[in-house]
Amino acid sequence: MSTQTETDRRSVVGRIRASPFLSELLANRLAVVGLSIILALVAIALYARVTYDLGTLVSSRLGTEIPDRAPPGWIGPAPFNIHLFGTDAAARDIYKRVMYGAWLALKFGTITVGISTVVGVGLGIVAAYYGDVTDNTIMRAMDVLLAFPPLLLALALVAIFPRELGLWRAVVALTLVYTPRFARVVRGAGLKVLEDEYIDAVEALGATDPRVLVRHILPNTLAPITVQSTLNFGLAIIDLAALSFLGFGAQAGTPSWGLMLSRGVDNGLLTGKWWLSFFPGLFLAITVLGFNLLGDGMRDALDPRMREAID
Amino acid sequence: MVSKRFVAKRLLLLIPVLFGVATVVFAILHLAPGDPARVIAGQRASPEQLQRVREELGLTRPLWEQYLTFLWDAVRLDFGQSYTISRGAPVRQVIFDRLPITLELAIYGQLAGILIGLPLGILSAVKQDSLTDHLTRVGALSGISIPIFWSGPLLILLFSTYLGVLPTSGRISTQFFLPETWTLFGYELPLTGMITVDTILLGNWPAFVSAVQHLFLPALVIGIYSTALISRMMRSSMLEVVRQDYMRTARAKGQGTKITLLKHGFRNALIPVVTIIGIQFGTLLGGAVLTETVFGINGMGLTIVTAIGALDYPVVQGTVLTFALLFTLVNLFVDITYGYLDPRIQQ
């Protein structure tokens, strides 16, 4: 049995070695730190999602024996009732809210980046492959969206949607902001792949357009797409928080980091009650740092020919 | 040198983009919920009053006519009148008053980024894998990861609440009152709207000191971000350049290390950095929106946030278009600089 595991292990190592991208990425200490941060956050997010009830995190605790704005480490009457990060202006436990915020950030970040990636990749690959009018139409439309400063386009778009949509309107707005970035990267990478002779070969063999696009061009642009997604993941989480901070994202009471931060600033920062805004911001910064560390390492590990497509 | 043809071509390419930008803004505002007539006339307005306001605003005309009118107005930079936040005032005036405030903030932030970021990036590249390099890299990555709306409040807490050395918000102490104009050789000239410049023009030193104290933290938070970004880019660009053949040739002919780095390395490494500075100017403007909100500075950023909340569509329209125009022009300028730094681009 041990030989079996040994062979398994070896084949995994062998495969990692065989992939210059992965081996180079894993040799990058900062990228590994980034990956560890993200994995830890995923664990926190899932734990919070399963353990905590959103309703109790949202509703006010005022009027109970728990004081509002209690400092970090405040211990309540019941055993193990420690409030590690203190309580907020509605006497809610900041620690639990921050943990749940990880779930919200990762969930909405994934949706934003996911949709932008899929739509952007589709548009970019079609533009690269068909060229001419198709390419021009798609890319000029993308240019228009790229001509807006990102956060300002998101702000203007958020104005269209009803307030009740909460974080969803921020998601839709940011998806429109990010899609052109993916389209541009994928188009660039796709054009490089198209230069290769095997594309001519499969076309000569009679492969249909969708087949060439999906089976031959797409797999070869996956590396830059992954890098772009990772780098934009950090940006998406920060932008979602920014929109909530400005009052155009999460609805009142939601334990989203951006909203907790802005409420925390309003409800106690100037009187020295720093913990209301400090902890949500700290987790936000660490999360974004994690994605930036990993994304950076991934970009460095990327084939130089593909690296040109990014930026 | 940059050829006139190159510049003309870039200018022509701007037209379809700006046309598209205007169309997007028109579409956004027409899709926005809420009846502009009700925003202006108020909740208790009678149907007749609402109808009259709609006619005044031209909302009863066919959509294509409204669109063409909007485009023509946009070309003349006429965005109508504010509905709510500066009720009745021309949007152009609102923008004219508040744009310098935002520009001042963005310029100081960007300037700090360039002045600190470029040398840091070069140092980091020249001393690759040294302690300086590691610290710079980790610092830079942290700098772009820390949200402005977190570092800003924390700095206010430290410098204003705890240390009491800097003000918490605003642009200048309320004790100072600045006139509308200043005099030069007996001529009355308008002021710039940039408070650090204006106080110097007026020769009012105590006011200048107060303005600098107020601007310090907002410019610092933008500057940290900008520094982080530029030093990162400068480092990777410089590392790419020092490996080039011409650098070895320059050293081989006996030129000193420093001269080679500055004369051959710096200029070539600067090319991609200039592009990044341009592209990131958009992010910087977004940063200005957040910074203005955090520090209560009534520039374009705070204006757009208030206008969206108050359904003041003409102001939203005008400010978003102005931001997009500004961003596009900065990128045009960057393109031209790029052509100057790397003449091959022009072909």
Image (cartoon, coloured by chain):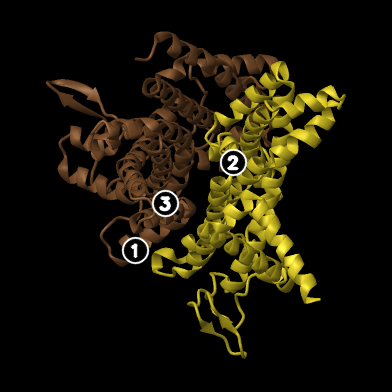
Nearer to me, A276 or B129: B129
Separation of disc 2 and disc 1 at Cα?
A: 45 Å
Picture quarter with the N terminus of chain B = top left
The residue wearing badge 1 is: B158
- What is the chain letter for disc 2? A
Is label 1 or label 3 in front?
3
Nearer to me, A223 or B233: A223
Chain brown in the figure, letter: B
- Confirm whether circles 3 and 2 share one chain: no
The residue wearing badge 3 is: B140
Question: Can you name the residue that lies furthest to the left here?
Answer: B185
Nearer to me, B211 or A151: A151
Q: x, y (%) of residue A208? A: 86, 26
Question: Secondary structure beneath disc 3?
Answer: helix
Separation of disc 3 and disc 2 at Cα?
A: 24 Å
The image shows residue B165, relative to residue B229, as above or below, that is below
CB-based contact (under 8 Å), mark 2 and mark 1: no
CB-based contact (under 8 Å), mark 1 and mark 3: no
Chain A, hue in figure: yellow
Mark sitting on residue A238: none
Nearer to me, B245 or B47: B245
- Label 2 packing within 10 angstroms: few (<14), some (14-19), many (20+): some
The image shows residue A81, relative to residue A123, as above or below, that is below
In the image, is A30 to the left or to the right of A249? left
Is label 2 or label 1 in front?
2
Q: Quadrant of residue B101?
A: top left
Q: Give the residue drawn at x 48%, y 31%.
A: B323
- What is the chain letter for disc 1? B
Q: Amino acid at mark 2?
A: Asp
